[in-house]
Image (tube, grey):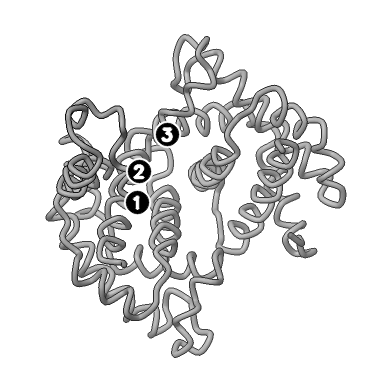
Amino acid sequence: WVWSEICSAADYKNADKTPDQHQLSCARSSSERLTDKMVVLTKEELSYIVEIWSQVDKKLITARALERVFAVYPWTTRLFSKLNGKFKATDIGVQEHAAKVVSALDIAVKNINNINFKQLSSDHQNIGVDTQNFKALGQTFLVELALQYKLKFTPKKHAAAHKFFKQVAEALSSSYH
Amino acid sequence: MVLSEANKQEIHHVADLIKSKTAVLGADALARLFEIHPQTKTYFPAFTGYDATNAQVIAHGTKVFDAVVNAAGHLDDLPHHLEKLAKKHGTELLVDPHNFVLFSNIIVVTLAIHLPTLTPATHTAVDKFLEEIAHQLSSKYR
């Protein structure tokens, strides 16, 4: 990001500063600014996510979401050549990756609005994962939830889940540089 | 973007399933769009409400889904079929094209809710179809 994107010249706090002081002030508050931009779940949304995560068969739904992301967005298989084209939910490679994703989501659900994936994010960058993949997997998770809950997956619950997976994607992208 | 014969079959099948339910599905999809991406409401300032029971939401949702069903009958000439709508969106409505992508993802979730199933193969075909519609609708802006 460019400092000017997060700091507007019209910002009243900076009106009395010189351009250099203004830039410094923006850079210092940049981490707060980035947090301002990030999605935040309400108490109601948070409790829905906690509830839903305790209800679903985590490994199953995650493996299915992975199968779906590999099928619908085939470019997401880019770094999974070791799976040898075996991308079904029941295939061992997908099951293994699902287990890792479940562990991470367990942590995310326990730390909603304060997810620290700095290390996990770095690991993904080192592997070479495009952050767009996290959004794609978020979308296929939503589809799996919709398939399971049907009309019980109301617009408000859909919105809560959308925000949660957006937060997870943001956290996984947070260390990229 | 090329739709395979298998893709086309899937799309025809889905269109058949939804053609009698465009009001229910359209209203649901639109309500979800407004809930998840509140900025999309700015295109409908005259609406008295933004949930699926609102008459205006139902009317507009129906219009959109009827258009999607119609487009499914023109898979071999989508650019020509959608040209009028593309011009309307690009010169008159001026909807930010990014919204077509947001709405497409929500339409997929809506289908997953209302259809008996949505296999990865069907999902892929629908996703490609909606992507092509979005691409066509975005083509007359500049």
Parent chain of label 1: A
Q: Are the two marked residues, 1 and 2, in contact with CB atoms closer than 8 angstroms?
A: yes
Residue A152 x/y as whole percent: 36, 38
Residue A141: where, in percent of width, then height? 39, 56
Q: Residues within 10 Å of mark 1 (few under 14, many from 20)?
A: few
| Marks 3 and 2 on same chain | no
Q: Secondary structure at mark 1?
A: loop
Spatial CA distance of label 3 from label 2 is: 22 Å
Q: Is residue A48 shown to the viewer in this render?
A: no
**Is residue B52 something one can see in this rendering?**
yes
Indicate the amino acid at tag 1: Val
Gap in angstroms between the C-alphas marked 3 and 1: 25 Å
* Callouts 1 and 2 on one subunit: yes
The residue under label 1 is: A2
Instruction: Identify the amino acid type marked 2.
Output: Glu
Nearer-the-camera pick, B16 or A108: A108
Going 13% across and 54% down the picture, which residue do you hit? A111
Task: Quickly name the residue at label 3.
Answer: B37
User: On the rendered structure, is A54 left or right of A132?
Assistant: left
Label 3 close to label 1 by CB (< 8 Å): no
Instruction: Characterize the local packing of mark 3: few (<14), some (14-19) or many (20 or more) Cα atoms within 10 angstroms.
Output: some
Residue A112 to residue B40: above or below = below
Q: Quadrant where the C terminus of chain A lies? A: bottom left
Mark 3 against mark 1, which lies toward the viewer?
A: 1
Residue A162 lies in what quarter of the image? Answer: top left
SS state under label 3: loop
Residue picked out by circle 2: A5
Front tag of 3 and 2? 2
Is B11 rendered above or below residue A92?
above
Q: What percent of the width, then of the height, locates residue A170? A: 30, 55
Per the image, label 2 sits on a secondary structure element best described as helix
Determine whether A69 is above or below B106 in the image. below
